[in-house]
Image: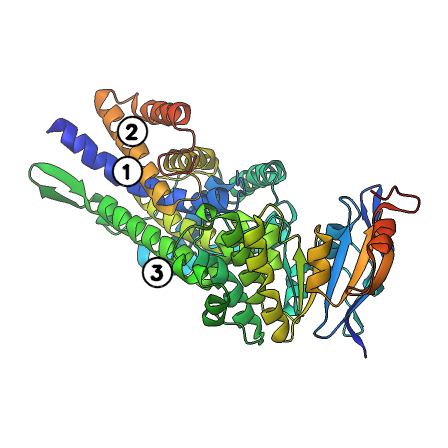
Amino acid sequence: MTAVLSTHGLIARYGDFQALYGVDTELNAGEAVALIGANGAGKSTFLRSIMGLLPVSRDMVRLDGEPVGGTPTDRMVQKGIAIVPEGRRLFTGMSVEDNLRVAIDQATRVGAKGGWTLGRLHQLFPILKEKARTPVQSLSGGQQQMVSIGRALLCQPRVLLCDEISLGLAPKVIREIYAALPEIRAAGTAMIVVEQDVGLAQSATDRLYCMLEGRVTLTGRSAEVTREQIGEAYFGAGHAVV
Amino acid sequence: MQWFDALVQGILLGGMYAQYALGMALMFGVMRIVNISHGDLVILLSLVGISMASAWGWGPLPVLIALVPLAVLMGWVLQKTVLNKVVGSDPLPSLIATFGLSVALQNLMLQIWSANSRSLPGGGIESQSIEIGGIYIGLLPVIVLIVATALTWGLDIMLKRTRFGRALRAASADVEAAAMTGINPRAIYALATAVAVGILGFAAVFQALRSTVAPADGPAQLIYAFEAVIIGGMGSVWGAFIGSMVLGISQGIGFRIDPGFGVLAGHIVFLIVLATRPQGLFGRA
């Protein structure tokens, strides 16, 4: 089976600071993979590198085997990768519907097909229909996250990158949002989910990668890796088990 | 009656300022590009229009029809070649680049057209007036106001209802998130500047019809456009229109108090707005 998306010795820097030290990952069609790790492990940097938001070499990122590293972000979206960015990054001052319509416009412009429509999104998150005309900045955090996910889906991605979609939300709202992921997967979309909550990450995915200080320290099937293995990979060897 | 006349003349003057301010509202208010050469572009287009009229004997309408597409093209080239390299969250690079462009344009115009003041012959419309209830209203200022209102309305609809407008608003709210949604911000900005300078094509024809233009006149037009956008509030097209009216009325009333006080009155009202409501009349705090 060839990977939809893979990284090969991915290295990324912010100026003089090196954030990723040769990260190898792969994501198969229809698969959901979790990326866990402490703050500063390089998870968001990893997603940003894939999306062309940081300069990386061409060969370091491949989509369907084709080298695409460093492709401008808007071109990556056209190639079928969408991101739900950390902090949601909605277009303030615009209504819920206009935020979503921006994605529809661009997908239409480039002729992207993937089956996500406003109607189908409204079935997934009914509140978005009710709040269609509300400016996004007056929504609750959970509702804003739904808009952000919806906006990414309407880009008609084959691969969806989710960056800390549970951050700052109440447990009930987190469950509601994670309940939508199986339906998104059922549509054939592969996913990389960056998540702080390890238990949540394990339950929502097939495989996981754990990162520490810019390197992958553990990979395995989400259902099979043990707490001890994760603890060691998360904090580094010799950590105190509490 | 005298004051009512001042008010009416001020509104008509505001129509002219609105034509300068709309392009500025789009570039400065929406894209956060500080274009110091804004006024010089108006003057350049005016002088090109005047040369067209004298070379081929064209009236104002053919000049307008030829000048607006030329302005659109100029705006697109300007963004592609200069502004896309300096656009970003920091307004300073665009300010410096367009300041240089402004100086270069003024010298270029001086070289081609000399320092003489010129105007566009209007075939009589510039001196026609209508009398309504004892007030004389110039036909040309009325046309200017109507065109300004139509341009504001069109630009507002374009920003709110079209694919291009949504993409531009998205890019100005969060340029990185816009790219993550598949928008190429630089292509969108090139179109937006094309529209902004295209509107200056209208302003250029009317400016050359209602008064004279000389190569060094640009900076004054720039100040009025800036003031109108800031009074109205950044990012709001109708705000820029209302800001232009406030500026025009202030000057109209100021001129009536004392002919030397008009321009200063506009600046004073601008400073009062800046001090009491820095986000502008229609801006969000």
Q: Earlier in the sequence, mark 2 or mark 1?
A: 1
Query: Could you give the CA–CA distance between mark 2 and mark 1, rounded to whole angstroms?
Result: 8 Å
- The residue closer to the viewer here, A131 or B195, is A131
Q: Do the residues marked 3 and 1 share a common chain?
A: yes
Q: Do the residues marked 2 and 1 share a common chain?
A: yes
For mark 3, name the chain.
Answer: B
Helix, strand or loop status at disc 2: helix
Looking at the image, which residue is at 40% across and 46% down? B22
Q: Which mark is residue A11?
A: none
Looking at the image, which residue is at 37% across and 41% down? B240
Q: Which mark is residue B13?
A: 1
At label 1, which amino acid type do we have?
Answer: Leu
Query: Could you give the CA–CA distance between mark 3 and mark 2, rounded to whole angstroms?
Result: 32 Å
- The residue identified by callout 2 is B251
Q: Earlier in the sequence, mark 3 or mark 2?
A: 3
Q: Which mark is residue B62?
A: 3
At label 3, which amino acid type do we have?
Answer: Pro
For mark 1, name the chain.
Answer: B
- The residue closer to the viewer here, B225 or A130, is A130
Q: Earlier in the sequence, mark 3 or mark 1?
A: 1
User: Going by the image, does A194 lie left or right of B9?
Assistant: right
Residue found at the very far bottom of the displayed protein? A1
Q: Relative to residue B90, is residue A129 depicted above or below?
A: below
Look at the numbered discs 3 and 1 and tell me whether their residues touch, using CB distance below 8 Å: no
Look at the numbered discs 2 and 1 and tell me whether their residues touch, using CB distance below 8 Å: yes
Query: Could you give the CA–CA distance between mark 3 and mark 1, rounded to whole angstroms?
Result: 24 Å
